[in-house]
Amino acid sequence: MALRLWRWRRTNQARSEKLSKEEWNAFAARTAYNEMNRHFSKEKYAANVPLDVLPETEEPSVEGQTEIEVFSLINQVWQEICGLSLRQRWALLLHSHELIIYLLQGGITEKEVAEVLELSGSDWHDIRNRLPLTDTQIAKEIRYASRRRLSLSTAGSIKKARYEARVKLEGSIKR
């Protein structure tokens, strides 16, 4: 769900910038709600109830539940990111400052991000200030950060790793 929101915001940047905070929260809530319905309906755990059927008086509790669902989904995505290969983690995380911001807003700490990228705090702060990185820049950073492994990274291999990471994440979230 987090990736779906991130992708929508990135592809519809002009439209998303026009949304007020309340409109964005409502959109995120609907997206989280629909994603949860998709997930649970595939698993036959819950019925698919349209949002317009819910009474207006329950809006505050739905908003609170949605926030919890969003944090839960962010945590789920983070766990899946941690399970990716190091090359995939670098390719995915360092290519998008929006994804990093979304994870940080969801409760993932910068220390956790640095650890999953196997970077020291100072190296992470240096890279963080230059995000997003191009595939060529990521390949060069991998060579610099890890002389033992991943030393033959190219822009093409970074692009492929990011694609593979996205496929794995989308597949795991649909489960």
Image (cartoon, rainbow, N blue to C red):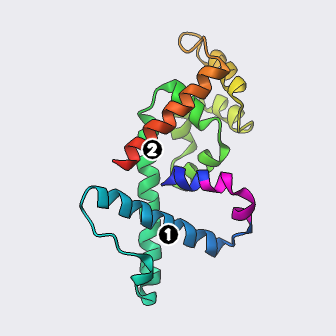
Of the residues shown, which amino acid type is indicated by label 1?
Arg
Q: Residue at x 50, y 64 (%)?
A: 31
Tag 1 residue: 30
- Measured in 3D between alpha carbons, the distance from the residue under mark 1 to the one under mark 2, in whole angstroms, is 19 Å
Foreground residue, 118 or 173?
173
Can the viewer see residue 79 in this picture?
A: no
Say which quarter of the image contains residue 22: bottom right
Pointer 1 and pointer 2: residues touching (CB < 8 Å)? no
Foreground residue, 14 or 110?
14
**In this rendering, position of residue 106 left or right of residue 135:** left
Farthest left residue in view: 44
Position of residue 44 measured from the top left corner of the image (x, y, whole percent): 24, 60
Say which quarter of the image contains residue 128: top right
Position of residue 139 measured from the top left corner of the image (x, y, whole percent): 66, 21
**In this rendering, position of residue 30 left or right of residue 19:** left
Q: Residue at x 69, y 32 (%)?
A: 127
Placement of 20 over or under 9, stated as above or below: below
Tag 2 residue: 170
- Which mark is drawn over residue 93? none
Placement of 149 over or under 99, stated as above or below: above
Placement of 131 over or under 6, stated as above or below: above
Magenta stretch: give its range: 8-17
Placement of 117 over or under 145, stated as above or below: below
Position of residue 6 measured from the top left corner of the image (x, y, whole percent): 59, 52
- Assign the magenta stretch its main secondary structure: helix
Q: Earlier in the sequence, mark 1 or mark 2?
A: 1
Foreground residue, 151 or 110?
151
Say which quarter of the image contains residue 19: bottom right
Can the viewer see residue 28 in this picture?
A: yes
**Dot 2 alpha-carbon crowd within 10 angstroms: few under 14, some 14 to 19, many 20 or more:** some
Of the residues shown, which amino acid type is indicated by label 2?
Glu
